[in-house]
Amino acid sequence: MITQGVQVTGRCSACGATTTCDVGQFLDRDVLRWGTEGRCADCPNGWCEQDSGPVTPENIRQALLKAHGPTRLRPSGDAPDIVPVLQALRSARHLSLGEARAQAAELTGTGLIGTLVEMEFLAVHLRRRDVAVSVEPAG
């Protein structure tokens, strides 16, 4: 399992006090999942939410990118055949053909950028189609 998380603070919607929230993404059995769990310091307000799918809520993504920095996914070795790249991207991210073409161009150009878990998730899909890729810090 690949996981990445961070703790963030905010304001309680019930009483206005400080909340502490653990947010994260994880790759479990080749499924991209995300979760958030929080609690208020001064009242019983709390929550726990978890889901999966190709899109993680942007507030979770941004908290992870801020805390851990972006990760880059790019081909390793020779330029890959476009067909398996398109198939992998469409399958992993539920993209239209046009969206997949744009991301394939980005992948073979500067590389795709995202959270560590997102890039490892795409790497799994690409490697299944014999596309050699590397995942590395983007900085």
Image: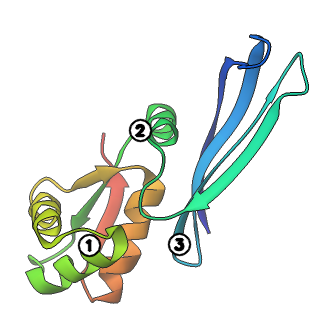
Tell me the quarter of the picture where residue 10 sits: top right
Q: Secondary structure at mark 1?
A: helix
Residue 81, can we see it? Answer: no
Residue 89 disc label? 1
Instruction: Give the amino acid at mark 2.
Output: Gly
Q: In this view of the protein, which residue sits in the foreground, 45 or 133?
A: 45
Residue 64, can we see it? Answer: yes
First in residue order: circle 3 vs circle 2: 3
Instruction: Give the amino acid at mark 3.
Output: Val
Tell me the quarter of the picture where residue 6 sits: top right
Tell me the quarter of the picture where residue 116 sits: bottom left
Q: Residue at x 84, y 28 (%)?
A: 45
Check the image and name the residue furthest to the top.
16
Q: Secondary structure at mark 3?
A: strand
Cα–Cα span, label 3 and label 1: 14 Å
Q: Position of residue 139 (x, y in %)?
A: 30, 39
56 above or below 85? above
Q: Which residue is mark 2?
A: 69
First in residue order: circle 2 vs circle 1: 2
Q: Residue at x 89, y 15 (%)?
A: 42
Instruction: Give the amino acid at mark 1.
Output: Leu
89 above or below 117? below
Q: In this view of the protein, which residue sits in the foreground, 134 or 100?
A: 100
